[in-house]
Image (tube, rainbow, N blue to C red):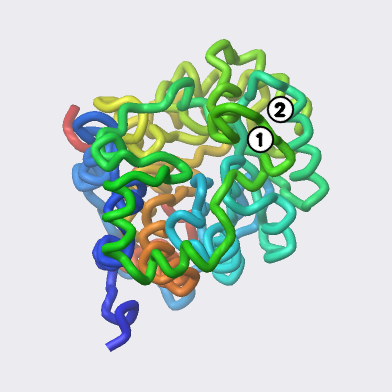
Amino acid sequence: MNKLASAHNIDDLRALAEKRLPRMVFDYIDGGADDEVTLRANCSRFDAYALNWKALVDIASIDMTTTVMGSPCAAPIIVTPTAAQRLFHPRGGETAVARAAAAHGLIYSLSTLGSTSIEAIAAETDGPKWFQVYVWKDRAIVEASLERAKAAGFTGLILTVDVPVAGNRERDLRNSFTVPPKINPETVAQVLARPGYLFDMLTTPKITPANFADKTPEGDGIMGYINRQFDRTVTWEDARWMKQVWGGPFAIKGIVRPDDARRCVDIGADAVWISNHGGRQLDGSTATIDALPDIVHAVDGQAEIILDGGIRRGTDIIKALALGARAVAIGRPYLYGLGAAGEAGVHRALEFLTTSLERDLALTGAARLSDLGPDFVRHPPL
């Protein structure tokens, strides 16, 4: 039996990815910071919110279409930016994910640290595309990246603000894992245990940050150069500057506080992206679904709200939308699919989420996304 055909949910794809990938690569997808409290809470806290369905509603036709920051999408699901996707499937990586997203009519987001270039992604898909950036110390790098993204047809920009320094990801430390992986006895042993993955690695180009291909730093190499570019002095004025330089739809990703959400609105952001980086940065931080209601109140309809973290089912999406999110974003779900079976695995992950959302909207008694509201959700006790 086809392995993908035997996978019926995101957890099944996770299990397939764990079997195919070297331990260090799987843990890089799967792990979080410190004790992984926030990683687990992002998923488990959805269970605290119960759905109240409406009865005797005409659900003969379910409409999941929407727009997010002006980009049309067949469902309110954004493929969130994640770095170095060729690590998880050397033959596919970002191109496989972008093609799958376009096939499902979803917004694709490319990480500035992707292993496929801006221009290569643009050549693969004419679907809606956004580009993710940081504020680097060298602002010329930022400006050049934005110009390349505009020229390639990317219509939205995402500024990630929750990585002033890297979180303490202990699984990576135990595996001696780096990006790109360094050759040592432990990493070699893990790769040798997965011969299919090893073959793909040996017969495909070297995995590097493709959008920095023009940089030829000496000493500690390209990753050392990139790490030195992270700027600890970034403030809201830098975010305002980036919005002005970009001049188009602009989201700030990595927000969990209502006062920060208001600052996003004040500097002109089109979307507030609620995220704790998938529990990979500050452990013990707020689960994103718990941050949502207060941020919705603070933003007061003056910007769209995107939420990531813990989305595994259509019911998770419905809860987020009912509480005020415009859309949700997913990372690990499609990375599990990519790690399990490349582009076909990403298709399977997106199929799970879109079909379960359609079914669960019908069961909830909401024929359109606009039918959803807070009355569909019973809030947990404080």
Instruction: Judge by depth and name the residue closer to the eye, 281 or 305.
Output: 281
Looking at the image, do the residues carrying marks 2 and 1 touch, with CB atoms under 8 Å apart?
yes
* Number of other residues with Cα within 10 Å of mark 2, as a class: few under 14, some 14 to 19, many 20 or more: many
Q: Residue furthest top?
A: 233
Is residue 380 positioned above or below 61 on the image?
above
Q: Residue at x 46, y 67 (%)?
A: 200
Earlier in the chain: of badge 2 and badge 1, it is 2
Q: Check disc 2 and report the residue beneath it.
A: 243
Res. 216 visible in picture: yes
Mark 2–mark 1 Cα distance, whole angstroms, equals 6 Å
Q: Can you say which quadrant of the picture contains the N terminus?
A: bottom left
Q: Can you say which quadrant of the picture contains the C terminus?
A: top left
Is residue 117 positioned above or below 258 on the image?
below
Q: Amino acid at mark 2?
A: Lys
Q: Residue at x 74, y 63 (%)?
A: 123
Q: Check disc 1 and report the residue beneath it.
A: 250
Give residue 265's quadrant in the image. Answer: top right
Is residue 287 positioned above or below 319 on the image?
above
Res. 301 visible in picture: no
Q: Amino acid at mark 1?
A: Phe
Q: Secondary structure at mark 1?
A: strand
Give residue 237's quadrant in the image. Answer: top right
Q: Secondary structure at mark 2?
A: helix
Residue 338 percent across, percent down from the top left: 43, 63
Q: Residue at x 28, y 74 (%)?
A: 7
